[in-house]
Image (cartoon, rainbow, N blue to C red):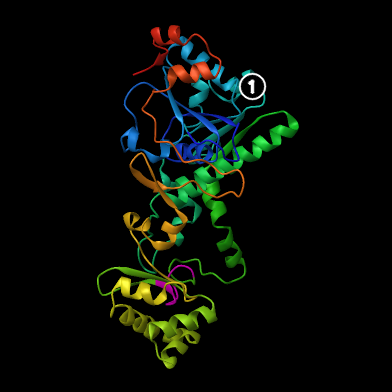
């Protein structure tokens, strides 16, 4: 587990789930919080083996049989000593387990109870199943991503699960924890992906109101609607990204690309944009990605190579910043953001499921671990 970091001393209980909940717990652990992942007996639901699941790094794992009469009481004993609890089940599930907000607040009035869902705790869709693509679909975010006339492009699960979900859950529980230091009272944080993803579109709503945005994808200055904000294929089949929005950056871009002044001036005339786009396309197609990267690297042209996930860690800038690190033999992003004084330590690899049950109970002041393990309440390998 990470030692140091601005959240040192904060204790978090994570009721194990998938996707945005574990990522939120990872972020808290990366910043120094002590996170205990409470898992259920049986096979893991993750798409990757537990030992390779980056989202499980930096914490300890305990397997508790919540169907056992003492399972609920064991978790509540941990909750009594925690600052934050995170769960990512459908509304009502933890209540049926006896681990809902009222149950937890009863044993710890200061607990911050973070609830991570797609649709939220209330509303007509609250009980329904869904995934990232569905949540961002109804917010308008998905409809804004893609080229004009083409289908919307799902942005993996970065905008919904992690951007609109995990990030806002972390903001919420930390804000509630700060408030609890003053009031002495915990509260429930309802972090819905539909709410967070909608918040991410705030800029676009402002542009809409100012008549600076067309409510159709691929027809605006940030969505490939203009030739100077797009991706272009190189001679080796790779891609370069161009974001030369401001005139001075555009001027440097067109100069380094080798466009003649007359063609570059087509920026001022929308009727000439197809010609401008064609000229940019032809220019990039004449060289490899690396050749163009060498031309633009370090300039103000706002051009960068489009790298794959495995290539990213090797980029000189990211390598210099150690943006990617090795944890247990797996290359992965380093903790972010960075701090000048309370610097988080190097993350620990994901634990084996249930590997820390006995030690967690001992460290958290629950002294009948042997009996609980023998009774099958706690499952240890």
Residues 324 and 241: in front is: 324
User: Where does label 1 land, which residue?
Assistant: 108
Total number of numbered labels? 1
The chief SS type of the magenta part is: loop
Residues 133 and 156: in front is: 156
Q: Residues within 10 Å of mark 1 (few under 14, many from 20)?
A: many
> Residue at the location (40% across, 63% down)?
146
> Residue at the location (42% across, 87% down)?
272
The residue at the far bottom in this view is: 262
Left or right relative to 171: residue 350:
left
**Location of residue 372 in the rendering, given as x and y in whole percent from the top left corner:** 44, 9
Magenta stretch: residue 161 in it?
no
370 shown above or below 126: above
**Location of residue 314 in the rendering, given as x and y in whole percent from the top left corner:** 36, 58
**Location of residue 209 in the rendering, given as x and y in whole percent from the top left corner:** 61, 66
Residue stretch in magenta: 222-230
**Location of residue 266 in the rendering, given as x and y in whole percent from the top left corner:** 45, 88
Q: In which quarter of the image is residue 242?
A: bottom left
Does the image show residue 252? yes
330 shown above or below 62: below
Q: In the rendered view of the protein, which quadrant contains the C terminus? A: top left
């Amino acid at each position: 587990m990470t030692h140091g970091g601005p959240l040192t001393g904060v204790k978090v209980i994570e009721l194990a789930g998938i996707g945005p909940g574990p990522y939120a717990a990872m972020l808290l652990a990366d910043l120094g919080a002590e996170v205990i992942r409470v898992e259920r007996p049986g096979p893991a639901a993750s798409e990757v083996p537990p030992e390779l699941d980056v989202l499980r790094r930096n914490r300890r794992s305990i397997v508790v049989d919540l169907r056992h009469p003492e399972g609920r009481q064991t978790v509540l004993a941990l909750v009594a000593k925690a600052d934050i609890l995170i769960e990512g089940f459908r509304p009502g599930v933890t209540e049926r387990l006896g681990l809902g907000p009222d149950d937890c607040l009863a044993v710890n009035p200061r607990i911050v109870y973070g609830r991570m869902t797609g649709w939220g705790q209330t509303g007509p869709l609250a009980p329904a199943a869904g995934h990232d693509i569905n949540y961002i679909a109804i917010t308008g975010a998905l409809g804004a991503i893609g080229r004009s006339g083409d289908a919307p492009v799902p942005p993996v699960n970065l905008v919904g699960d992690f951007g609109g979900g995990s990030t806002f859950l972390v903001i919420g529980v930390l804000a509630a924890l700060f408030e609890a230091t003053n009031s002495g009272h915990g509260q429930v944080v309802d972090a819905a992906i539909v709410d967070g993803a909608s918040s991410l579109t705030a800029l676009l709503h402002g542009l809409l109101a100012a008549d600076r945005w067309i409510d159709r994808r691929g027809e605006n200055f940030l969505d490939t609607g203009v030739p100077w904000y797009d991706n272009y294929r190189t001679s080796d089949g790779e891609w370069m990204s161009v974001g030369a929005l401001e005139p001075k950056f555009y001027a440097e871009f067109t100069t380094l690309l080798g466009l003649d002044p007359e063609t570059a001036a087509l920026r001022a005339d929308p009727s000439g944009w197809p010609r401008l786009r064609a000229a940019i396309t032809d220019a990039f197609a004449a060289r490899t990605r690396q050749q163009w990267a060498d031309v633009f690297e370090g300039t103000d042209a706002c051009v960068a190579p489009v790298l794959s996930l495995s290539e990213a860690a090797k980029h000189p800038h990211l390598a210099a910043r150690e943006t990617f690190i090795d944890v247990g033999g797996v290359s992965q992003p380093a903790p972010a953001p960075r701090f000048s004084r309370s610097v988080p330590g190097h993350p620990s690899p994901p634990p084996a499921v249930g590997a820390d049950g006995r030690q967690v109970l001992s460290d958290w002041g629950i002294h009948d671990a042997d009996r609980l393990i023998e009774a099958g309440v706690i499952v240890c390998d």
